[in-house]
Image: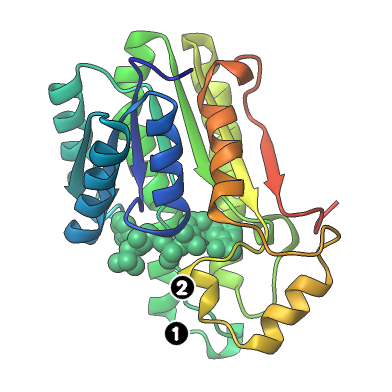
């Protein structure tokens, strides 16, 4: 129970990796604020946490790309729990297509949700965390932010941008005791990847040395490490959770 008396806010917590992270942090003793654009999905995660772990958990409907909504969720969480110790910027979307066919709106939307969304919550949480002189922010990037990927220019740019945000925030907040790190998952079996054609999934699996796609729980394990005291001397780092795909 390394996170007892810690308050964690996870975006995109309604399903997939965000939900697995929320459950894992709650299992480690944290009170969890589950944030998602879908109110019902966020509420489902919070309810599962309360039932499974008898832990404190609430849900918040919020579009992370809207700064006003992000700021008011952070304010509500601090009002309710008295602190904010862990922020996991996980909400993310894809709108894949080749650059020459990519609609400018799809470029904008992916950048706004994946990158501006993380900036919004980081900015909103920073005042409390720096005042507390403690906190851990974990951004969910992607290996395609390191390698690029044909057909995913918007997504890869947003995920590379998250790495720049992570390192800049790590440098800004380190003197106040707040750490900022990123996790870069490879191919993880969630609804996001279930939409891909079977042959595309097979292509991904062929280039994974450990021979399987990852699970949301594999990512949650890395987030727990970065969120908690076992990583207290790590900041500005990117941990790949990809079965060895990119090395
Ligand atoms: P997912 O199953 O699609 O879940 C994403 C969650 O974020 C959904 O609950 C979604 O709500 C929510 N969301 C979307 N837009 C939002 C917004 N504007 N505001 C608040 N919440 C929003 O995706 P996942 O596979 O778990 O991925 C989670 C994160 O890991 C993403 O950042 C993704 O880029 C990253 N990642 C995933 C993989 C992978 O292989 N799966 C690999 C690398 C990185 P809705 O239900 O309404 O869409």
Decide if residue 203 is on the left or right side of residue 14. right
User: Which residue corresponds to the image point at 61% horizontal and 18% vertical from the top-left?
Assistant: 230
| Residue 128, placed above or below residue 240 | above
What is the distance, in whole Å, between disc 1 and disc 2 at their CAs?
7 Å
How was this image coloured? rainbow
Decide if residue 133 is on the left or right side of residue 140. left
The residue pinned by badge 2 equals 107
Residue nearest the viewer, comparing 57 with 84:
57
User: Which residue corresponds to the image point at 60% horizontal and 72% vertical from the top-left?
Assistant: 153
Residue 81's x, y, as percent? 19, 21
User: Which residue corresponds to the image point at 45% horizontal and 48% vertical from the top-left?
Assistant: 20
Residue 124's x, y, as percent? 29, 33
Residue 85, image quadrant = top left
Q: Residues within 10 Å of mark 1 (few under 14, many from 20)?
A: few
Q: Which mark is residue 74?
A: none
Residue 154's x, y, as percent? 54, 69
Residue 105's x, y, as percent? 38, 78
User: Which residue corresponds to the image point at 35% horizontal and 50% vertical from the top-left?
Assistant: 13
Q: Quadrant of ligand 1?
A: bottom left
The residue pinned by badge 1 equals 103
């Amino acid at each position: 129970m390394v996170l007892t008396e810690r308050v964690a806010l996870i975006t995109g917590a309604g399903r997939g990796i965000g939900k697995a992270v929320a459950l894992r942090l709650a299992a480690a003793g944290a009170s969890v604020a589950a944030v998602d654009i879908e109110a019902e999905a966020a509420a489902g995660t919070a309810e599962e946490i309360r039932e499974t772990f008898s832990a404190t958990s609430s849900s918040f409907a919020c579009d992370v790309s809207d700064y006003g909504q992000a700021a008011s969720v952070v304010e509500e969480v601090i009002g309710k729990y008295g602190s904010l110790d862990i922020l996991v910027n996980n909400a993310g979307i894809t709108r894949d297509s080749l650059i020459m066919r990519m609609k400018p709106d799809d470029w904008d939307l992916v950048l706004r949700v994946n990158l501006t969304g993380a900036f919004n919550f980081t900015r909103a949480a920073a005042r409390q965390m720096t005042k507390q002189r403690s906190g851990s922010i974990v951004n969910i990037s992607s290996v395609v932010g390191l390698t690029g990927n044909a057909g995913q220019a918007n997504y890869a740019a947003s995920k590379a941008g998250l790495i720049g945000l992570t390192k800049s925030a790590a440098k800004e907040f380190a003197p106040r005791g707040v750490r900022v790190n990123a996790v870069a998952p490879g191919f993880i079996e969630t609804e996001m990847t279930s939409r891909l054609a079977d042959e595309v999934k097979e292509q991904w699996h062929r280039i994974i040395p450990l021979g399987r796609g990852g699970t949301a729980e594999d990512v949650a394990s890395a987030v727990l490490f970065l969120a908690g005291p076992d990583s207290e001397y790590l900041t500005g780092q990117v941990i790949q959770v990809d079965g060895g795909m990119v090395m």
